[in-house]
Amino acid sequence: MAEKTEKATPKKLRDARKKGQVAKSQDFPAAFTFIVAIFGALIAAGYFYDNLAEYMKAMFLQVRNLSDFENRAGGYIIAGIQIIFSTSFPLMLSVSLIGLLVSFLIVGPMFSMEVMKPDVKRLNPVTNIRNMFKLRTFVELLKSIFKITGALLLIYSVIYDSISQIIETSMIPVLASVYVFSDFLKNVVLRVGIFFIIVAVLDLAFQRRNFAKEMRMEKFEVKQEYKDTEGDPHIKGRRRQTAQEIAYSDGPSTAGKARAIVTNPTHIAVALEYDEEKDPAPKILTMGLGLVAQEILRVAEKNDVPIMRNVDLARTLYYKGSIGDYVPEETYNAIAAVLKWLAKLEQEKRLGERTDLSELFK
């Protein structure tokens, strides 16, 4: 099996996204919902306490009159449910919205039915055992141990800092001790919450790097995807239209950004761009005939872009290539000579030497 050395193409990333496969960290929503849930509960505690006290007082006052209490029992039950619901619903809604918002900010808008479809592969014991020994599973285990250990140490530090106040709660009124424990809990949540957010940031960086590695492609896959895409008549038509628009508008002006120009020498000009680290092959930046070709050459000369005269290659690129696409596969040998010439030219330019082109095509 060939080594996967190429970065995932936009098409592969789009297809993976449709299946719900994206780089994400579950720790981010969990950290923020943890903080919101606890602080929300502390804020709602006062409201809940006041309403519950009034509710219990009304019930106990009616206990003395059992006959009347039996008639009103249904109303008291409904009132109790309303108190619980009015306190818990806003809290649950806030927690849910925060979780959705954080997930949205990390992965963007995404809805995939593929995740909900049953997958027989998930029932395969061999696959499940193999997944247990993946790097991701090992990292998740270490992360869980690290989070639990870190949280316990932070809780211990808060207890250590507040131990004198906690001891004094035995000598103060109950209501005052409630405020002491409330402050204690806030300190715990704040420290642990910030710790969880830091872990989430590190986890997200790891998940993105690991996802990019899993999405890597073989060079053959990149070429095959390009061929499959080229076969789509809709995509071909759209590219042809885009090429025409560029060629007759501001196409020649982009020639200054090209790595090299291939010409025949005046009727056809094709500007090539190439990034060795990103592209498996050079791309056609812009091209043109006649006056457009002359304008491309003028811009190239103005920006010191190397110009190579190769009649056959220029014609093949123009008639079989498309702007924005990789060069046709049949031109790879000729393009290799262009890249060799270009590399030598750039090297000698750095050394301040002159390029002898005749040696290259002997």
Image: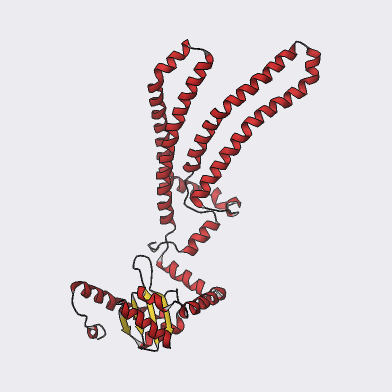
State whether residue 99 is above or below residue 353.
above
Name the residue: 40% across, 67% down. 219
Image x and y of residue 349, in percent: 22, 74
Looking at the image, residue 204 sits to the left or right of residue 49; the answer is left
Looking at the rendering, which quadrant does residue 305 occupy?
bottom left
State whether residue 222 is above or below residue 292.
above
In the rendered image, the quadrant that contains the N terminus is: bottom left
Looking at the image, residue 29 sits to the left or right of residue 157; the answer is right
Q: Is residue 307 visible?
A: yes
Looking at the rendering, which quadrant does residue 18 occupy?
bottom right
Q: Is residue 133 visible?
A: no
State whether residue 20 is above or below residue 174.
below
Q: How many marks?
A: 0
Near-viewer residue (351 or 128): 351
Looking at the image, residue 19 sits to the left or right of residue 194; the answer is right
Image x and y of residue 320, in percent: 46, 82
Image x and y of residue 224, in percent: 46, 70
Image x and y of residue 42, in percent: 54, 28
Name the residue: 37% across, 65% down. 278
Name the residue: 73% across, 22% down. 76
Q: How is the image coloured?
A: secondary structure
In the rendered image, the quadrant that contains the C terminus is: bottom left
Looking at the rendering, which quadrant does residue 296 occupy?
bottom left
